[in-house]
Image: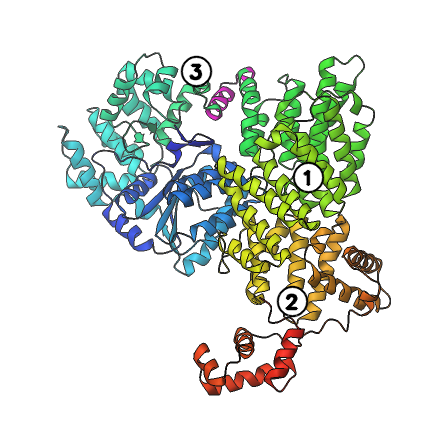
Amino acid sequence: MKLLTDSPILKMKISLPGLKEHLIRRDRLLQDMAAAHKGQLTTIIAPAGYGKSTLLAQWAHETDERCAWVSLDERDNDPVRFWRYVAASLASILPEPQGARLMHHTQLLPSASIETFLDTLISELYEDLEPLHLILEDLHSIHSSAIHGGISYLIDYLPEHIHLLISSRTELPFPTIKGVVNHEVHLIGMKQLEFTCEETERLFRHASNGGHPVLSSMQLDTLRNQTEGWVTGLQLAVLTMRTGNGLEGFMDDMKGNPLLVSKYLFQEVVSKLSPDVFSFLLQTAVLSELHPQVCDAVTDLSDSRPMLEELQKLNLFLVPLDEHQTFFRYHHLFSQFLLDLLQREFNGQYTKRHRLAGQYYASIGSMDEAIDHMLAAQDFGHAVNLLEQHMPSMLEVGEIATLLKWFDRIPPSYPMTPEMSLAHAFVLVLTGDLERSERMLSLIEEACAAPGSSERSEQLMSSILFVRSNLVFLNGDFGKWFAFSEGILDNLMPDNPMYYQFDYNRREPYVRRTSLGMKGALSADTEKIAHLFTGVLESHGWAHSLMNLYVKQSLCEGYYEWNRLTECRQLLAQIRNAPPAKETMGLFVPLHITEARLFAAEGKFHLAHYALDEACSAALSRKSSLWLAPLKAVRSLIYMREGRIAEARKEVAELPVSVKDKPAYSRETEYLALVRMLGRQRRETEALRLLELLKPQAEREQQRSSIIEITSLQALLEQQRGQRQQSLHLLGEALRVGAQNGYVRTFLDEGEDMRQLLQLYSSRLGQENGLSLEELQTLEYARMLVEHFPGYSEADISSAETSQPVLPEQLNRNEMNLLHLIRQGAANKQMAAALGLSEGTIRVYLSRLYGKLGVTTRTQALVKAQSLNLLED
């Protein structure tokens, strides 16, 4: 049943459903859909029983183009789960490397926003230009506004070769009117789905092949009018006819009330079934999928296969879920009728069958289904036990909304253990319900701190501290953390591996970019908490816990950023010597990247490359290829700092990024390496375009480290192309955020160009009067940064104005090409041939070039270009 061994994907939900035998082919609708699929979106919207899913399945089976299918249900009201299924469905039909990358990108969730994940997904979809159709069946099951917003975002940015098809019982919960006006959205509604006279006649002609009376044209026309072409109503009429009863009463009662199905399912169909069939239907009504094994588990039968075959023969609202017709479900209306009947008249059976289903799914490891069934049976004891077992896995895949839904289905009156109450509080923290989690945490703390509390309560304090630490990372209430921790740290006994042995980083090259690293936020408070927290863990024998090592790695990266290199190196040695750091790639790679940057800062470039080699070898040996690209990006930056531009260019060329991309947050490290290389190549416009697209994503993620780095690079590129005012404005923006967190190395590692720009900024701002307090602090911070550069002297700042020749207007690509040709000694005729222009045009371009440089001859142009560093590689 699993699609991937390491991912909770049920293959049945993303498999193309099978088709029933003797299905009525909807030719007119299929032709309509084929003509409409050139647009962006097709919606099929109608009440239950109008054949929406059947039509989509027919179309998907007949089209020659690829179709990704997702069957939605109530469990999918979790944004992480929803988009993981969408990604898995797409990955199943994409070429292997692309599909594998797409599944790796799901590891962005839930730490990054849905929009950031969708940016990455959309970027991958642009890589493959073959037509592809994504089908979302039963969207009415989804009530999450976050998911609705994500689908709307996806529609807005879908590549042209991707076509989205959605079926729903209700109108879409996001606007599509713009697409309708632009002919990008095709609507199929209830009226189009109604059976025509010809389709009705085909349905009953097939039914009469079994020896049933043939209806006259008038009877068929009357029946169609009475049911208003409602597909399920017509199918119900066929079943009624097969019982030997006439259709007159059926047609009379259906008039004006086509959805009154339960009366006829019971009186005219179900009541005519054999007791064995009727009993089987009731006992399996609780199931969302039917196959022999699960049916055996919940019924009184030892072999359910013959009964399922009997239901197929009876054509009793059984819907195939796979092409081999080994898995089925009941039609939604029929299922609801059976469940209502089971609850109303056989309530003991309702809970019994849910409990049996829960036991079956637990036995095969399908814990999601097991917990849902146990909760439906109100067997809260077993449900909580299963939830406790399953919670680490759910945290690992990030399906936090599902966890919260399960916790909230347990009544407040149920006596939850303190450990599970704390787990509930932790889930509330992760979902952002900080007020509710604070109330729950306070109650648990009071109970544990009460006089006469047990050793178990004292042990629980360590887990409480962990949850409160996560809470303080979100609400910034450091005082609350210190108040709680004071006096208990020395007595804590870490006792829950769910919190302390969890792998907190699956894809980030820097731990400080994760939520555990507070997304780049640095302060004296965070440093103090880190030291207290790791001190407690180490004093109680948890020095090698992943929690301890991740906190240390985050602190280590902070020390590097603060330019406290000695402390950074000491922590690196501690982490490196811990056995889990060698096995956990989320630690191993950031550790070696930090080590490489530290060596580079000390001028030991050969050791920096050795550290990166070690990380690359580990990634290759463990088949963790997703780490290779960021490692290449970091290596290219070190090559640039060494002045080995050719080697850096080769590394960047092998990265899976391009100047034409819409850059995705998940590959920010790689894109920033490309940006720096573009800057070296004087391709500022292309570099700035990438930064302008990356920056909103960093701001959306509230990623301080990214915001500072991106804005600093914007400032350097604007200065390089002669836009001094814009450059200084951007630098001020980066400095204001940097000053709040004490960032140093982000600026120092950019080298001489950043030093000169900081000097210019300090000189300019220092000459202004009436500076605000924030401006004074930023000025002081900029001067402090200048002092950290090698070879600093106080005269540097005062001479900054004269040492920074800047063009009043930037040079375009043709003018830059002309400069390079001038340096090669090319004549006008040779220039014209090289650039594909006329000699007259060359003379015009040269005149404009001289004007921008403020010169009149080629020699003067070369001298001025060299003073501006315009001819560097």
Q: Give whichever of 250, 187 is nearer the camera.
A: 187
Q: Locate residue 304: give its quadrant.
A: top left
Tell me the distance, in whole angstroms, between the alpha carbons under discs 3 and 1: 47 Å
Q: Is residue 680 left or right of residue 187?
A: right
Which dot marks residue 554? 1
Magenta highlight on residue 379:
yes
Q: Check disc 1 and report its element: helix, strand or loop.
A: helix
Give the mark, 2 or 3, whose residue is nearer the N terminus: 3
Q: Give whichever of 108, 293 is nearer the camera.
A: 108
Is 603 above or below relative to 215?
A: below
What residue did someone put label 3 on?
356
Q: Check disc 2 and report its element: helix, strand or loop.
A: helix
Is 155 above or below relative to 840?
A: above
Residue type for callout 2: Glu
Residue 597 on image: x %, y %:
66, 47
Residue 167 on image: x %, y %:
39, 43
What residue did someone put label 2 on?
718
Give the mark, 3 or 1, whose residue is nearer the N terminus: 3
Density class for disc 1 (Cα within 10 Å; few <14, some 14-19, many ≥20) is many
Q: Of the residues tagged 3 and 1, which is closer to the observer?
A: 1
Residue 163 on image: x %, y %:
38, 51
Residue 174 in sight: no
